[in-house]
Amino acid sequence: MSNKEIMIGAGTSSPLIARKPGYGTMRLTGEGFYGEPRNREGAIALLRKAVELGVNFFDTADFYGPGVTNRLLADALYPYSDDITIATKVGTKRGTDKSWLPYGKPEELRTSVENNLKELKLDQLPLVHYGKAAHSPGDYEEGLGTILALQKEGKILHVGLSNASVDQFNTAIKMGKVASVENMYSYTQRVTDPASPYGFQGGELLPLCQEHQIPFIPFFSLETSLPTGQNKMKELADIKGVTIAQLNIAWLLHQSEWILPIPGTTSIQHLEENINAAGISFSNDELAFLD
């Protein structure tokens, strides 16, 4: 396995190998991450181009759209090649007013898993991230227990966490095998901001993921970093002849071998730039300058 790949579910009988970076599908939806994209055929073409360029890890959820990105993936890539991993998440639903609502009761989690299976045309979900950031420990354990039960039933291959706190991470690793963690993390967002609408940040969990050799998947890594707080990034990007977005992705990859970025875009040009960012290197002086 090269340094541009990462193993998800190491130590299990069916590990997954993901190439870096992956692709986050949420931006393929309509305005406010709701409804169909303006150009559906363009979205399908972008997903196929991603595979052509070597991407084999796609992040989605039944509440993106809702159901939009799952159906786009199925229309673009089904039947899926053996090396493609589609990661979904549960614990949230969208209101008709485009609000984001909790959806984490046991029966709701089962419904979400069934939605993902149906929309993606799969018999088993390769990776499901369970996320409930603001509930009591008892609620969290009940929800995670439901997901682990669905794993035993064969509907889920690997279980990960999303928007997890340190306490929730420690609870989860005692209950079962955690394959991955998906939290917000970027050059400008490294610790939890109580005012953030996105939940827990990754700075607290990245060291724990490294300690337990669990892949860490940062989301909104560009959405929250750009375009503010980038003076040093812009200066170095100009020197290296790359975009600020590319430098952000490269910076993430240099933070840990366990990081799997999933930048999203609706542009094939930006998709190509994001993938090429994996080849950007830093000197020690450059990393010191950024930090």
Image: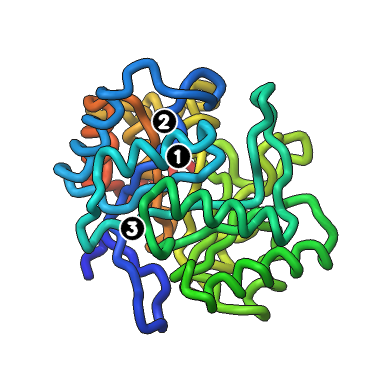
Q: Is residue 44 above or below residue 56?
A: above
- The mark that comes first in sequence, 2 or 3, is 3
Query: Which residue lies at the image location 30% right of the left edge and 48% below the top edge?
Result: 283
Query: Which residue lies at the image location 51% right of the left edge and 59% below the top edge?
Result: 128
- The mark that comes first in sequence, 3 or 1, is 3
Which disc number belongs to residue 290? 1
* Label 1: element kind: helix
Q: Is residue 216 above or below residue 177?
A: above
Image location (x, y in percent) of residue 176: 60, 79
Kindly identify which residue carries mark 2: 233
Image location (x, y in percent) of residue 240: 25, 32
Q: Nearer the viewer, mark 3 or mark 1?
A: 3
* Label 2: element kind: helix
Q: Which amino acid, by three-letter code, is at mark 1?
A: Leu
Kindly identify which residue carries mark 3: 85
* Label 3: element kind: strand
Image location (x, y in percent) of residue 262: 40, 45
Q: Say whether marks 2 and 1 touch (CB < 8 Å).
A: yes
Q: Residues within 10 Å of mark 2 (few under 14, many from 20)?
A: many
Quadrant in which residue 98 is drawn? top right
Q: Which amino acid, by three-letter code, is at mark 2?
A: Met
Q: CA distance from mark 2 to mark 3?
A: 31 Å
Q: Nearer the viewer, mark 2 or mark 3?
A: 3
Quarter holding the N terminus? bottom left
Query: Which residue lies at the image location 27% right of the left edge and 31% below the top edge?
Result: 44
Q: CA distance from mark 3 to mark 1?
A: 33 Å
